[in-house]
C-alpha cells in the first residue's frame, strides 16, 4: 500500500513538472521575440505608437502577475458573460505578455548601453540601420543582457507555481456556484472586479512612483556614458 501511494504521488509530481516545463517553454519561445518587438514599438519615432506601447509596458510591469492571470482567466466571463478561450489559454497569455514586457525593458537597457559611435561608424561604412543593428549592435546587446535575462528566466520557473493558485480559485468558484445558484454571477462580478480594479490601481501608483524615481536616477547618471 505504501509503495502504491508513493507511485501515485510521484506520478502526480511528474505531471506537475510537465505542466511547469510546458508553461516555461512556451513563455520563453513566444516572449523572447515578442519582447524585442515591444522594444521597437516603445522606441518608435511615431509618437502615438511609442506612447501606447510604453503605457502598456508600464501597466504590465506595475501590476502583479497573479492579478493579470486572474483578469485574463475570469475577466472575459465576468464582463461579457462567457469566456472566449480556455482558462489554460488565459494563463499562457498572461505569462507571455508579462515576461515579454519585462524582456523588452532588458533589451532597451542593453541597446542603450551601446555607444552612439558604433552606429555612426556603421553608417560611415555604408551599412543600413537594420544592418548596423543586427550585425553590430545586437551581438553586443546579447552579451550585456545575459545576466538580467538569466534572473528573469529563473523567476519564470518560480512563477509557474501561481498556476496552482488559479486552479484552487477555480475550484472554490465552482463550489460557490453550486451553493449560490444563479446569484453567483452577480456576486462574482461585485466580489472580483472591484477588488481587482483597486488592487491594480494601488500597484500601478506604487510602482509608478518607483519608476519615476529610477528614471530620475538614470538621467542623473547619464553623464557617465562613454
Image: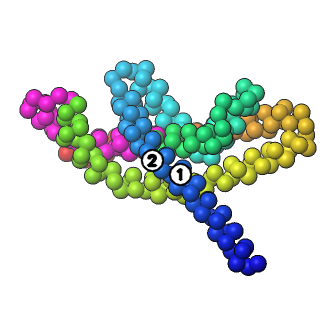
Instruction: Tell me where the magenta segment starts and ends, as one range.
Output: 101-129
Examine the residues drawn in magenta and state their main secondary structure.
helix
Q: Would you place residue 27 above or below residue 52 in this image?
A: below
Decide which of 59, 87 is in the foreground and name it: 87
Q: How far apart are marks 2 and 1 (CA)?
A: 10 Å
Where disc 2 sits, the SS reads helix
Tell me the crowding category of disc 2: few under 14, some 14 to 19, or many 20 or more residues within 10 angstroms, Cα based: some
Examine the rendering and report whether any part of residue 85 can be seen. Answer: yes
Q: What mark, if any, has residue 173 been given in the picture?
A: none
Where disc 1 sits, the SS reads helix
Which quadrant of the view contains residue 115? Answer: top left
Q: What mark, if any, has residue 28 been given in the picture?
A: 2
Which quadrant of the view contains residue 11? Answer: bottom right
Q: Write the residue at 62% across / 59% down.
A: 15
- Direction from residue 40 to residue 226 in the image, left or right: left
Quick one: quadrant of the N terminus?
bottom right
Examine the rendering and report whether any part of residue 102 can be seen. Answer: no
| Disc 1 target residue | 22
Residue 171 painted magenta? no
Amino acid at each position: 500500500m505504501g509503495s502504491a501511494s508513493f507511485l501515485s504521488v510521484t506520478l502526480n509530481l511528474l505531471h506537475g513538472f510537465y505542466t511547469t516545463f510546458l508553461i516555461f517553454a512556451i513563455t520563453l519561445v513566444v516572449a523572447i521575440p515578442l519582447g524585442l518587438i515591444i522594444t521597437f514599438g516603445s522606441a518608435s519615432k511615431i509618437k502615438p505608437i511609442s506612447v501606447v506601447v510604453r503605457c502598456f509596458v508600464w501597466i504590465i510591469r506595475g501590476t502583479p502577475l497573479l492579478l493579470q492571470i486572474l483578469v485574463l482567466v475570469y475577466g472575459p466571463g465576468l464582463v461579457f458573460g462567457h469566456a472566449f478561450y480556455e482558462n489554460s489559454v488565459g494563463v499562457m497569455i498572461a505569462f507571455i505578455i508579462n515576461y515579454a514586457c519585462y524582456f523588452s525593458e532588458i533589451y532597451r537597457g542593453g541597446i542603450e548601453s551601446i555607444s552612439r559611435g558604433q552606429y555612426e561608424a556603421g553608417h560611415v561604412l555604408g551599412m543600413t540601420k537594420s544592418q548596423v543593428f543586427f550585425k553590430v549592435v545586437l551581438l553586443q546587446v546579447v552579451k550585456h543582457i545575459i545576466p538580467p535575462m538569466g534572473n528573469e528566466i529563473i523567476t519564470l520557473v518560480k512563477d509557474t507555481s501561481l498556476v496552482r493558485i488559479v486552479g484552487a480559485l477555480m475550484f472554490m468558484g465552482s463550489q460557490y456556484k453550486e451553493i449560490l445558484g444563479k446569484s453567483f454571477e452577480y456576486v462574482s462580478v461585485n466580489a472580483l472586479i472591484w477588488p481587482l480594479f483597486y488592487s491594480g490601481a494601488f500597484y500601478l501608483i506604487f510602482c509608478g512612483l518607483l519608476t519615476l524615481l529610477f528614471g530620475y536616477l538614470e538621467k542623473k547618471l547619464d553623464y557617465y556614458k562613454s
